[in-house]
Amino acid sequence: CSLTSSLIQQKLAEKLTILNDRGIGMLTRIYNIKKACGDPKAKPSYLIDKNLESAVKFIVRKFPAIETRNNNQQLAQLQKEKSEILKNLALYYFTFVDVMEFKCIFSTMQTVNFDLTKNYLDLVVTYITLMMLLSRIEERKAIIGLYNYAHEMTHGSSDREYPRLGQMIVDYENPLKKMMEEFVPHGKSLQDALVSLQMVYPRRNLSADQWRNAQLLSLISAPSTMLNPAQSDTVRMLPKRSVVIHVGFILCHAALNTDPAALSLWKLALQSSSCLCLFRDEVFHIHKAAEDLFVNIRGYNKRVNDIRECKESALGSMHRERRKFLRSALKELATVLADQPGLLGPKALFVFMALSFARDEIIWLLRHADNIQKKSTDDFIDKHIAELIFYMEELRAHVRKYGPVMQRYYVQYLSGFDAVVLNELVQNLSVCPEDESIIMSSFVNTMTSLSVKQVEDGEVFDFRGMRLDWFRLQAYTSVSKASLGLADHRELGKMMNTIIFHTKMADSLVEMLVETSDVSIFCFYSRAFEKMFQQCLELPSQSRYSISFPLLCTHFMSCTHELCPEERHHIGDRSLSLCNMFLDEMAKQARNLITDICTEQCTLSDQLLPKHCAKTISQAVNKKSKKQTGKKGEPEREKPGVESMRKNRLLVTNLDKLHTALSELCFSINYVPNMMVWEHTFTPREYLTSHLEIQKNVCLHKPLSKCHNLLLTSVRAYMTVLQSIENYVQIDITRVFNNVLLQQTQHLDSHGEPTITSLYTNWYLETLLRQVSNGHIAYFPAMKAFVNLPTENELTFNAEEYSDISEMRSLSELLGPYGMKFLSESLMWHISSQVAELKKLVVDNVEVLTQMRTSFDKPDHMAALFKRLTCAYHVLKRMTIIGVILSFRSLAQEALRDVAMNVYELSSAAGLPCEIDPALVVALSSQKSENISPEEEYKIACLLMVFVAVSMPTLASNVMSQYSPAIEGHCNNIHCLAKAINQIAAALFTIHKGSIEDRLKEFLALASSSLLKIGQETDKSTTRNRESVYLLLDMVSESTPLLQDKTEHFIMVCNHILCSSVNFDSKF
């Protein structure tokens, strides 16, 4: 702690530089210790262990003089844990030791003059903050005492630093009071340093009206001087944290009674803030602390009254107006620089001033909004703060983007102007010692050697050595007996300060951005940060600036320090989680707006559906025939398109508001293509794309509440809206369509959720076709649709609305060829199940059917054999179900053919007709059993056709078998048997490589023979619908493409036999 005065002067520049950096590192460590001790989850376990509670209390009570020898009972529990205590508390303990060493070194740095003011004040504020934070760690005595006890028990003696450290902890119980005593010898130095800010600090505390009248930050207020370089005599003069003005004058409080300038500056500071930032989210309420200190000092009643008056006037209205001014000023500045980025060269100072002003106001609002209890909503809640942050980020982006432009400008400035002027100033010095002359000459030589070619070649500049030399030169000239005093050569000092700023523009733009516009403090105000974001999204006019919140997350890592590397992961994870949350919320908000727009658009599209034109046509017909219908005074229905008629621009519909809100939010999402947060890349547009895909899947997951036409109309409206999104955001909507709609043609989507293909397939199989089997729905060939039949229990849906040709075409468009193929495969699986059951019935009757197959020309023998058959009804029932399924599939295939035209992968998948259905062949092929020989399988297939043929006469006794010419079918769907017989026969005999034609001839012979018996029956109940059954045989023969050419003579014979046996209606 004892350094010679000469050594201090020789190494003063280096010491201030190192101490300022190390002080920030120490603050970071102390801050983390305080937070850890305040968190039950992170606090050292020894401080919360119930078994050690009495020992810890004893140590704190006796601190720092802890008698370990005579208190074995009190401290016995610590004996077992001493090694672990030493290991786990070492980091905490030696951090406190480092603070003590920092304090010791700081005490040797108290003699400086004005020329080193800024760096000295930075060190003072770091020291003040460090000691105040140290006093806020409630567990500091317990940690230090526990460590020292464990050290004494392990090594036999106390740690060598413990006595001084313990005394420092005791002395700084009230840090402000202690520092007031400590700074008494150095009060004059600190006072001079603080008073030197009287020309700088007030400029930062002008009102918004004064800024506005001075046209502050405006590039266009004086067009003639737009290209003139902006300069200032006080570049980077203020310390990093203005807390030094508030607290510094408390430490040298005597100046407040003797120096009016000091009192004026202090009162101005007290009026600007009532809540000071010590470090990160640690704050200090200056008015209460100052009042508590001064009230006990004799003769300070006036100062106490001053404090109270300043507290009353320390309102937020001035800051509110400043933020309002800065929003417009930064917007103008960003707009001009975006159009003319070349102005970043001469007006760089304006940019960094604007960033600094805005940064200070944002942090002021954040700090006060979170810590002031009694506050006015208008003063401490700013719903437009996102706009100010956004323009800050825009200026930062301009600096990063056009950094080479600025670099080129200042390299020329340094070599072509600064070097010349500095050389003249040095030449005109009356006295210039050799050391100072060497340094000044090196400055001139360094600047003169610069060229634009270095910029064009991408050379990396580094002027840190030059800046450190200037710092050293100031230290050399700060000695009282120095030959060259900067105070006597102010122009030289101003010029060098300007040059230092210019060098930073050439090699340290990123560092300058951090110094003037870093708002990583938001990392420690997560709750307030999220609240500001939600307010931004809730206000449509501000949502376009919402991207500023994710962009702020890129600042967070700049608050870390190399002396505390363990917090990097914690802060990095927080920045990632917040950025992800913000982008996700923005995408959700955009998705919700798009959904609302789609709902409105679907409503408009629904008005154009054909179902709504009936009433309009009816009104037109009645009007033409002059018939009066309906109630008088009934309002006339608005026609589609009325919503687009506007009398003036002030009329705004809900759809207009939604589009406006969406365009604002999409501007924000589209503002940056990507952003880097802790070495992770975030792409805002991908968040929106992902949410659009999820939302579209959600919209399609519950389609059964709508018929196909309505769902297709909704999907088209949705796609139209999504296509319009490309006008706002550069995303590939086609990719969204492909990802979502192609997934919907499969059984499950990428999230494992059922698609519309699976939902509709299940619904048709389990609901519509099952109700057909139950006799509640019939297939009407004339209408090409399934229609509800009148029953006691009415169905909850109208089958025609889901199965007519227009609905099936809509279904084909929704599912596409692959979806329709899945539907077809599911239908075929059900058919194969029915065929498997039919084969079982054939096996049970195989002997009888074998005899009947060869006895169709022996009526009596056939009658006797028929009586031995079992389950003939079930055979026809299952065949009818197969026919119904095939009829439905035929509708689907026809609809797909109409939609797909010539675009298909396979003829069957595309809906093109085939004489032999390949899908049915594949489905039935999978039923081949290993236990049955191919010859036996073929025999069963032949007997199945025999079973169906000989069972057909039983249909005549069914009341529901009545044929209806109007629907060209039967109400019990037996007309579907024709399709089932033909396609099952074709498939089975294709599989078994038999003659389809021969088997169908055999079927017709057996069926004809069996049906001839009906004419001989006398029981009317068994023959009530025989004509309808005869027509069924005609349907079988007519719908057989494999027989129409080759067996025409055979069909005519059958028809002749039937016509000669019975008389029936004119259809035959």
Image (spheres, rainbow, N blue to C red):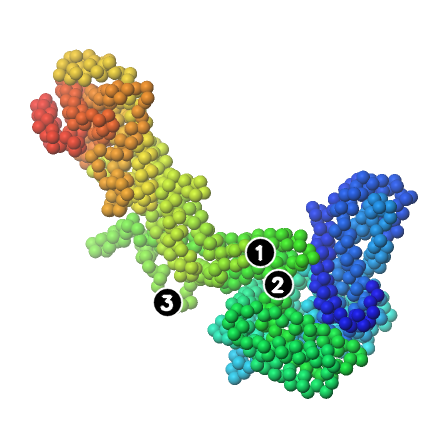
| Distance between the alpha carbons at the discs numbered 3 and 2 | 48 Å
Furthest residue to the right? 70
Q: Position of residue 27 (x, y in %)?
A: 72, 59
Numbered disc in front, either 3 or 1: 1
Q: Position of residue 733 (x, y in %)?
A: 39, 54
Instruction: Identify the image quadrant of the C terminus.
Output: top left
Circle 1 SS class: loop
Q: Which mark is residue 678?
A: 1
Between 728 and 105, the one nearer to me in the picture: 105
Q: Amino acid at mark 1?
A: Trp
Q: Tell me the residue that label 2 is attached to.
A: 519
Q: Amino acid at mark 3?
A: Lys
Q: Position of residue 586 (x, y in %)?
A: 50, 56
| Distance between the alpha carbons at the discs numbered 1 and 2 | 16 Å
Q: Amino acid at mark 2?
A: Val
* Label 2 packing within 10 angstroms: few (<14), some (14-19), many (20+): many
Numbered disc in front, either 3 or 2: 2
Which residue shows up at 85% across the image and 68% down it? 297
Q: Is residue 78 above or below residue 346?
A: above
* Label 1 packing within 10 angstroms: few (<14), some (14-19), many (20+): some
